[in-house]
Image: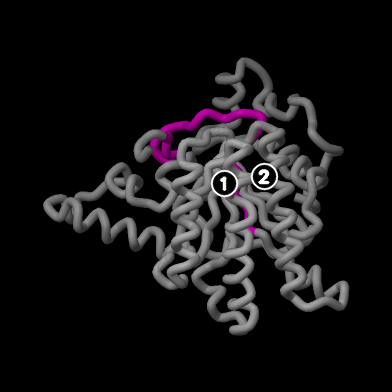
Amino acid sequence: MAGKFTSSTQAIPDVGNVPRHIAIIMDGNGRWAKQRFMPRVAGHKRGVETVRAMVKACIARGVEYLTLFAFSSENWRRPAEEVSFLMNLFINALQGEIGKLHANGVRLKVVGDLSAFEPRLVALIREGEAKTANNSRLTLTIAANYGGRWDILQAMNQLALAHPEKAGCYGEADLAPHLMMAYAPEPDLFIRTGGEQRISNFLLWQLAYSELHFTATLWPDFDDAALDAAITSYRRRERRFGRTSEQLGEQQGGPALAVSSAPTLAPPVTDRDA
């Protein structure tokens, strides 16, 4: 529901030891396959298995929202054969997984410009969203043909059409309901696998105050232990939202980094790992 969640630039959101919302760029499928002298598409197939495992892992840890960057608006630049394989893999995954997601109380959402997809794929997406719409155990969002700049522009265009009389006076609260992920809180934790350290046009608006975790682990190898290391890193962060460490300590009634005293989920990670 639009307007349900706190904007991190307008108010201080609630912070817990477990991220309420985790967003992930699933990078490294092609390199994983290349290391094994396999075609790149084999890495993408293995990556689907990791998605399945991460959905289960997030449910077990109490994460409420999991958002995965599956296909960016720039990924159309890849070889045509790979793009075609990815589209078919998306279709097969939807056909094979929707029933399982529904049985496990998972709500599916797909965000992005779906106009570029073939009608059969769009129909499967809409069917999956409709079937799982009332589930509340975990909201799984797949970003497909999505770009952060595109998201902001489409929201701005919708706002301009809806309220032309306010042109020149729009505020954040006016724009936020038109963003593709207005139904979810901002991500607490952003993870990118595969060693790259950039956000690659993913959720530009929503990641304003997210904690960033980069790992060299390739997506097909990203497992429960890797997820726990990311959450442990998140727990050590001082989430100030513009405040000072002293203010944070006073609010918590103890040391400013009191959050780090929470039970760890995995062995400590070094700054290099983070």
The residue sitting at the left extreme is: 165
Residue 11 placement (x, y as % from top left): 42, 33
40 displayed left or right of 153? right
Looking at the rendered structure, the kind of residue marked 1 is Leu
Residue in view at x 75 percent, y 25 percent: 261
- The 10 Å Cα crowd at callout 2, few under 14, some 14 to 19, many 20 or more, is some
- The 10 Å Cα crowd at callout 1, few under 14, some 14 to 19, many 20 or more, is many
The answer to whether residue 158 is magenta is no
Image quadrant occupied by the N terminus? top left
Looking at the rendered structure, the kind of residue marked 2 is Val
Residue in view at x 71 percent, y 67 percent: 44
Quadrant of res 152: bottom left
Disc 1 secondary structure class: strand
Residue in view at x 64 percent, y 45 percent: 100
180 displayed left or right of 188? left
CA–CA distance between discs 2 and 1? Answer: 8 Å
Residue in view at x 52 percent, y 58 percent: 143
Relative vertical location of residue 12 with respect to residue 175 in this rendering, above or below:
above
The reply to whether discs 2 and 1 touch (Cβ–Cβ < 8 Å) is yes
Relative vertical location of residue 174 with respect to residue 241 in this rendering, above or below:
below
Please report the bounds of the magenta region as a residue range.
5-25
**Residue assigned mark 2:** 55
- Label drawn at residue 140: 1
Looking at this view, is 175 or 184 the one in front?
184
219 displayed left or right of 148? right
Q: Earlier in the sequence, mark 2 or mark 1?
A: 2
Looking at this view, is 241 or 149 the one in front?
149
